[in-house]
Image (cartoon, coloured by chain):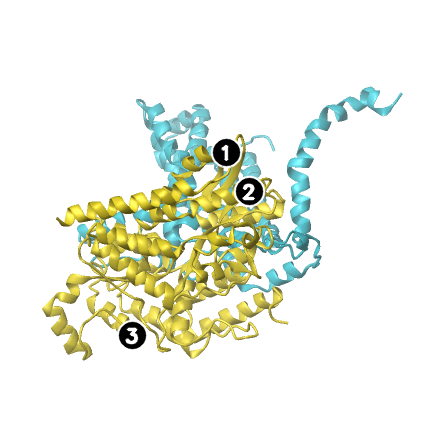
Chain colours: A yellow, B cyan
Amino acid sequence: MRKITALMLGTALVAVTGMASADETWGDYPGYTLRVKLIGGAQYEKLYAEIPKWEAATGAKVEIVSRKNHFELDKEIKQDIAANTIDYCVASNHTSFAPQYGDIYIDLNTAIKPEVLAEFDPLALKNATVNGKLVQLPRHSDISNLFYKKSLYADQANKDAFKAKYGYDLAPPETFDQFKDQAIFFAKAPDFYGTQFVGKDEAITGRFYEMLVANGGALFDENWNPTFNSAAGVKSLMWFKELYDAKAVPAGSLNYLWDDTGMGFASGTVAMDLDWAGWAAFFNDPKNSKVAGDIGLVRAPKGDGGKRSGWSGSHSFSITTTCDNQAAAVSLLTFLTDHDNQMIEARQGLLPTRTQVWKDITAEFEAAGNPFMVEVFNTYSQSMAEDAFTPPLIEPWIEVSNVIWPNLQKGILGEMDPQAALDDAAEKAKVIMEDAGYIK
Amino acid sequence: MPFWRRESATPFLLLTPAMLTMAFVVIVPLIFSMYTSFTGYRLVKPDSLYDWVGFRNYARILSDWDFWVPFGRTVLFLTIVLNLEFLLGLGIALLINRITWGQRTLRTIMMFPMMFSPILVGFQFKFLFNDNIGIVNNALQSLGLSDGAIAWLVDAKLAFFSIAIAEIWMSTSVFAILLLAGLFAMPRDPLEAAKVDGCNPWQTFRHITLPFLMPFAYIAMAIRSLDVARAYDIVTVMTDGGPAGRTELLWTLIARVGYDNSRMGMANAMAYVSTILSILFTWYFYRKLVAARRYMGGAQ
């Protein structure tokens, strides 16, 4: 009976979304070739498989002139700006990177119909705005919440031992202090680890930044003077250091990026993983993951400031000012971010930027009898609404990040005292902000 | 008669296409990048190409410890990698030279590592040395040689060693091939004369084979020193210069400054200072090459 209901609901949803697509007209651009540069990678590719539908509807062709990970794409776009060779119309973008690119992208506020923009989450659009211009249309968002291995928390022996050692009941962590206690408690290196963290590049800067905010600190004051070397900054850095020193994280964590942490949790050798929702379906798939069916999920923990960590951003698409057919580019952008295509991405766990898709994807998973993915979307929906904040949307963000993360590593490894490491990074960040004209 | 129709002008006219090609492909980019090193040029701000800052970039570099530490590390990396590649390449060449059957097949197999893209090699060794799921740690633990997860890519010495291993694995065959060519070209008479005079194998190798091979070795070293001084792909993939800058080499630093931070003026200034390294190594190996050839009684 349950299966039949699910089937009927699913069919109804397909019919509704199918109607929405049929009503949409994507324009007519026969013989035109739209050149695009797109972010590549397994989680992004499913959407691109839909592009032939747009080509069939419009008569245009899409030529993907570049498809790379975002760090490589970023370098390529910077070279294009330098060489004045922006000969493509659409490019993948990201809220953290967009402020660097000056005025190479058009303001989508005037190019896309207001009724289309009204269907997007207002906060996602606000974060996609640079100097008052909507330079990118958000495709999907990211924010991290805490996945954990449920069986560890249900084990009575674990409960008793934890209570005896720490004096409070073992339950998924509500604060970063509890997160640290539990990670150390569960770790049995080198076979099993309490947690793990991304340890280099903007990834660890972002993690540090969100903990800094959760602990009541800030990266800059109102005059753009770096303030991350505050007591809250030291406390945040110490969290990483204490976990590292206690061997609660793999020894190679400082070399890890997102794939390493995701694969680590899926390997079943890690108790907790603060990660984005893009892994959710993968984690719960027995073909890929040893923790499938044993995963719990709670919102990211709180810091000393009573706030949850919520470093967030959106992958997006932009249209170049040099584009020779902006109408076609707008059409493709609207197509790639329309309801149906956001549903395709959401089925993997990627967080939609259209408010209706949040409701529809949850309903679809409910109808399909997949309570784990329903929980994923409910949890991430709450954190996107209540916890999300972006890094400073300023041009020198990546450069500032590049002086912070090596010093975070030095603090974690004990090469520098944590306070000295942050003071040194703050001094370097100040020079960057002065050079960029933010500090007069 | 105009100059270009005179007979004496013919060599110049014939050389003109080559000179123009050289100018556009080599000299113009060199002059342009040299010019940008005196500006505050930022990739994302094309107008900054005209912000003349004089020697400010160079002055900052000279007093910047964050530049000189990777500079020194690159010199150390070059020294270790070149010497080990030479020793291993020499060993492989001597062994292959002794083989009488299947030598061609072995020579081809020996070239395999060079056929891989450096990025692929980087990923391969990153996986091998992964502390948690890597083959090296698993093998050590299974054999009972280690009971912990060795942090190959984190520990300062081990991380340096790991990237050196990857570099050596990929390019030792350059030495092996050149030294093998030297062994093939070696005349038999001195070896036979040595045997007649009662030299043992070590004496023959030390006083005849090795001096004969040294010019080939110095050519290989000059080529590889230019390559290794620009080491980038493998290091970027395996450690990206980290953690805490422990494996930062000149070109991972320069690429970060130039592309990630968009400070192309500063990056070009760093690149020009770093070419000193390549010039010094090339000059050194050229001098050694000339000395080795003189020792062998060859042309100067």
Q: Position of residue B166 (x, y in %)?
A: 38, 45
Q: Nearer the viewer, residue B203 or A74?
A: A74
Labels 2, 3: front one: 2
Amino acid carrying mark 2 in the image = Ala
Split into 4 quadrants, where in the image is the C terminus of chain B?
A: top right
The residue tagged 1 is A60
The residue tagged 2 is A327
**Kind of element beneath mark 2:** helix
Q: Is residue A287 visible?
A: no
**Kind of element beneath mark 1:** loop
User: Is there one chain holding both mark 2 and mark 3?
Assistant: yes
State the separation of the CA atoms marked 2 and 3. Answer: 52 Å
* Other-residue count near label 3 (Cα within 10 Å), few / some / many at <14 / 14–19 / ≥20: some
**Label 1 or label 2, whichever comes before in sequence order:** 1
Amino acid carrying mark 1 in the image = Ala
Amino acid carrying mark 3 in the image = Asp
Split into 4 quadrants, where in the image is the N terminus of chain B?
A: top right
**Kind of element beneath mark 3:** helix
**Are the residues at dot 2 and dot 3 in contact (C-beta closer than 8 Å)?**
no
A368 w.r.t. A242: above or below: above
Mark 1 belongs to chain: A
**Residue A177: mark:** 3
Write down the quadrant of residue A298 in the picture.
Answer: bottom left
Write down the quadrant of residue A238 in the picture.
Answer: bottom left
Q: Residue at x 41, y 29 (%)?
A: B194
Mark 3 belongs to chain: A
